[in-house]
Amino acid sequence: MHDVVLEWMVPYYPSMKKQLVKSLLFSSILVFTADAILFYPVFFLLVLVLAVTAFFLLRSWRYEFEYSYVNGDLEISKIIRKAKRKELYRCDRKDMTTVTKGRLAAGSRRVRDFTSGLKRADVYTIETGEECIYVEPNEGFLEEMKLYRKVRQAD
């Protein structure tokens, strides 16, 4: 029997809104540190609170998605800070109705997004019975889906 094993990683890139929050946090830390040194030492408490908030918030934005496709089973995991793994989604090839290029409108179905967040990324939608899954597949996965006639072009 011919086994099919595919694995690929997709790093997550923060959105513009998250990058703006990061910039505001760092700039406010700098401003309040300067104020604490020059004017009021009590601002060091505010600097400490902002620094701890930035540390934990920015750590939570460091993750990537790992896709594993083994003999018809697709498993998507989230790897947090390259140390902790959390399984997010599991699907069998039989449950996939279509794999379509682009982000399809979900309608009343539940949407799950496992993409990098980049605007220029090749995103495909996997449609199952009650869910639309947004993924960034590799060529091997697309070839496997073409073999089972699940890939179609967006309308």
Image: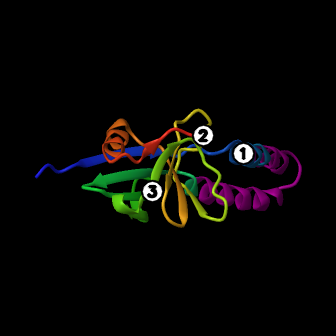
Q: Earlier in the sequence, mark 2 or mark 3?
A: 3
How many residues crowd around disc 1 within 10 Å: few (fewer than 14), some, or many (20 or more)?
Answer: few
Q: Amino acid at mark 3?
A: Thr
Query: Which region of the structure is painted magenta?
Result: 29-58
Under tag 3, what secondary structure? loop
| In this picture, residue 2 sits left or right of residue 109 | left
| In this picture, residue 42 sits left or right of residue 109 | right
What percent of the width, then of the height, locates residue 12? 53, 46
What percent of the width, then of the height, locates residue 75? 37, 59
Q: Is residue 51 magenta?
A: yes
What percent of the width, then of the height, locates residue 106? 63, 57
Using the numbered discs, state the Cα–Cα distance from disc 1 to disc 3 in whole angstroms. 46 Å
Q: Earlier in the sequence, mark 1 or mark 3?
A: 1
Most prominent secondary structure in the magenta stretch? helix
Residue on which the image places disc 3: 97
Q: Nearer the viewer, mark 1 or mark 2?
A: 2
Circle number at residue 131 = none
Placement of 97 over or under 31, stated as above or below = below
Using the numbered discs, state the Cα–Cα distance from disc 1 to disc 2 in whole angstroms. 44 Å
Q: Residue furthest top?
A: 120
Residue on which the image places disc 2: 155
Q: Nearer the viewer, residue 20 or 111?
A: 111
Q: Amino acid at mark 2?
A: Asp
Q: Contact (CB < 8 A) between labels 2 and 3?
A: no
Residue on which the image places disc 1: 26
